[in-house]
Amino acid sequence: MRAYDYILSKQIQWARNNGIDMIGSKRNRGYPAYTQNLYDNLFEPLSDDIKSSFQKGDGGELAGNPSKMQAVHSSSALGVNIFQYWQSNNEVEKIAHACGFCRKTTKISKDISFEVKYSIDERFQYSPNIDVVINNDPASQYKVFAIECKFTEAYTDREHSGIKKKYLDLDIWEGIPRLHDLAKSISPDDHQFQLLHSAQLIKHILGLKKIFGKTNFRLLYLWYDALGREGAQHREEIYEFLEVAKSDDIAIHELSYQELIARLADNYRVSHKKYVEYITSRYL
């Protein structure tokens, strides 16, 4: 079974096991992989602030009926289910530590934002949307911990784009020559990475560098692992990209959702019982 089909099947079975009725992407048409309402797909309802951030984002996650976020395999729903809880409980530092950004005793993380835009160049109409950003104390070295979240995206048949040539001549490449060379090699089309959307990661790095400088942010690629060839290839491509970015002294690392959830379960099964039961039963 292909990785995408396996993940989708597992999420549908989770919904059925919990008595959640499913509808198609056009309600009465399409494969029934969407919950009838958004609440059924989330551990807790969207907060007003987080709902507003998704409405302002370019992904249209809350638009339509059903919305993209109502899909049981929605990457944005997965991100909300993992991260919003710690914002609601005013314990952002715990998820920051679990993500590998900092030590357990570090208390610099203040709040969490979703669908954050960091402009690369004011001449461009759109800025890349970073899925999750943990905002830190302004006095700390790392102003933000940024997280690019992936669920099934790498395992679909949809091809990802390369870097458009308009990015290559910007002056923002100073200090990151190997990433610049990689960008040139995947412009305008990316024939180097099949599963990893490397152009998207490069744009995130450029946006973060433009706003915070090269050394004042950390970036995490948080991805959903899969058994078999596709999962192995995805991991190999992640390592290949990270080797390039780290050689330019970019603070970037990777973590699978399964590893993150296991860490959260090990540390908080008793103190955050319902949350841990939800994320482990659904996503492990």
Image: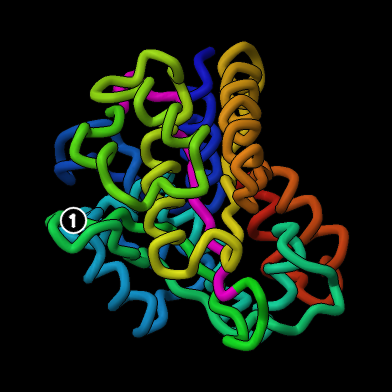
| Magenta region includes residue 152 | yes
Report x, y in % for residue 21.
37, 50
174 to 225, vertically: above or below:
below
Report x, y in % for residue 192.
44, 15
Relative placement, left or right, of 189 versus 112 is left
* Residue 14, picture quadrant: top right
Which segment is the magenta one?
A: 143-160
Residue 284 visible in the shown view: no
Q: What is the secondary structure assignment of the residue under circle 1? A: loop
* Residue 33, picture quadrant: top left
Give 82 or 180, whichever is nearer the viewer. Answer: 180
Which residue is found at the position 25% from the left and 54% from the top?
A: 59
Which residue is found at the position 35% from the left and 26% from the top?
A: 184
Which residue is found at the position 72% from the left and 53% from the top?
A: 261
Relative placement, left or right, of 253 versus 271 is left
| Magenta region includes residue 268 | no
- Reading the image, the residue beneath label 1 is 126
104 to 28, vertically: above or below:
below
